[in-house]
Image: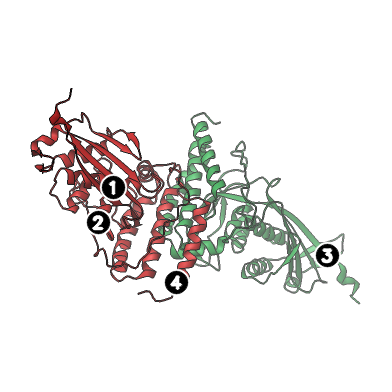
Chain colours: A green, B red
Amino acid sequence: MADESQKWVLMVTAQTPTNIAVIKYWGKRDENLILAINDSISVTLDPAHLCTTTTVAVSPAFDQDRMWLNGKEISLSGGRYQNCLREIRARANDVEDKKKGVKIAKKDWENLHVHVASYNNFPTAAGLASSAAGFACLVYSLAKLMNVQEDNGRLSAIARQGSGSACRSLYGGFVKWVMGKEENGSDSIAVPLVDEKHWDELVIIIAVVCSRQKETSSTSGMRETVETSALIEHRAKEVVPKRIIQMEEAIQKRDFATFTHLTCADSNQFHAVCLDTSPPIFYMNDTSHRQVLVTLSYLHEVRGTSYS
Amino acid sequence: MADESQKWVLMVTAQTPTNIAVIKYWGKRDENLILAINDSISVTLDPAHLCTTTTVAVSPAFDQDRMWLNGKEISLSGGRYQNCLREIRARANDVEDKKKGVKIAKKDWENLHVHVASYNNFPTAAGLASSAAGFACLVYSLAKLMNVQEDNGRLSAIARQGSGSACRSLYGGFVKWVMGKEENGSDSIAVPLVDEKHWDELVIIIAVVCSRQKETSSTSGMRETVETSALIEHRAKEVVPKRIIQMEEAIQKRDFATFTHLTCADSNQFHAVCLDTSPPIFYMNDTSHRQVLVTLSYLHEVRGTSYS
């Protein structure tokens, strides 16, 4: 029989939106720490739309860490989950829930296990950054549960070790993931570029062209690109740094024409380096090709008009 | 009534195969002379398969130069046709047909007009290099008609002014179009890399995925790429020169694994820079994507085996 004192459960639920890169992250310089070969910039979506909802629970009755994604149990044994769990646990603090009469001391966390239930309200692994929202939400909710005192910048460096683009989902609005220089990744964090309300009239339309899981995961896709593309290094070192500066300026000025031009050009260049990979990676199909052209001709029409 | 002496017609018919680039030409440094931004290498197909058949005729009864393509009259007023006609006419020599009792003096050619009838036995402007075969055949047949004494290298520099890749169709087997350095394009010519029979057991399979005319012509497509792609200059200056050396070596050694790897990689990179163009150019569709992957997995299987 279980001891009565073992029956308590503490829970935290959080919601984190996905983010869509306008200057793309594609390629790692460190696979384990997940350090990128270039800076990237994204827009975090409205949490009311595409988001992950994660509940984390701790109880002395749990004998191991477990996780369910969209209702199905998944393994937490992978390095990415283990890195996030270890980094958050290492920063845990005393927690007290007076109503439940529960006290967890800082040192107890290493012996306690968590259960995680995570749901995406949009297609998983279909190019909509489900792992970004997922890992950001996991790290954020665990940090709340364990009373971690780090700011979102420090948390972003932990979420980054789950999925690179996850670091950008810890802030709203326009967010830059600074690639950083340190070997340990301590300066590879997300920073908000502007106040969340800075460009509030910008509307983002997500058209789901195909909700099937993509054939090549981002992880293996970007590894193959870095290993085989003859264009990726030039993109990362020469093209992206200039675009990052132009994009930051376009966002500051709410310059819709430049913003959309750079976003389209960088998205197409990301698909271009995928195609330059050996064997080539195709993330677009005939439907997305048509959609790109329709969008561009629409933008061409509105670009001339004033946008306030 | 026409003078009886006006009734003679001299005709020459020639057949020229298309050529398929294995290191691609994409981008001009001179639009009028058609000078490329990089060397390219192609395989000329068997004239028994994809080819253009052109008949050129001269008669004092013709009052203007005219041309029919696939049975439909087309205008010769464009600069490309005019450049080819002018360059060939400038090199015309005395011609005598004793059977017909016809004598044309070198100086007469500037006052005589030609009629040209050209047929492609494959889809025109659908990515199968119809303009390459077409202009090569036009220049070759006119040169025969007008008794031009230049070798195929010199003729290739004239065909190049009709369509860049046409220069490579003047030779069989593996042909390199040397981009050259001269401003007047005199050193931008085709050179055969090996004897036509060097790799005779190589079989080329052409799968027509879509026979409709492509939506973006090569001419405007490559102009837009040169003007807007952030990757094309790196491709032309850094990537292609190395690949040209590797490809020449693979052809010399009949190294099938390297040959197919480079061919696929360069074809994909050509499509990549098209995608990096603003607005993007799509020359592949879902069917060609699948075909690329099927071909690559087939090649992966055979690459391990010996190839003699």
x, y percent for residue B291: 49, 58
Residue underneath mark 1: B164
- Tag in front: 4 or 1: 4
Q: Are marks 4 and 3 in contact (CB under 8 Å)?
A: no
- Using residue A303 as the reference point, say whether residue A51 is left or right of it: right
Between the C-alphas of marks 2 and 3, the distance is: 80 Å
Task: Provide the chain ID for the residue under circle 4.
Answer: B
Image quarter for residue A160?
bottom right
Q: Nearer the viewer, residue A248 or B292?
A: B292
The numbered disc on residue B302 is 4
Residue underneath mark 3: A9
Task: Provide the chain ID for the residue under circle 1.
Answer: B
Query: At x 26% / y 36%, what residue is drawn?
Result: B79
Q: Do tags 2 and 3 sit on the same chain?
A: no
- Tag in front: 4 or 2: 2
Q: Are marks 4 and 2 in contact (CB under 8 Å)?
A: no
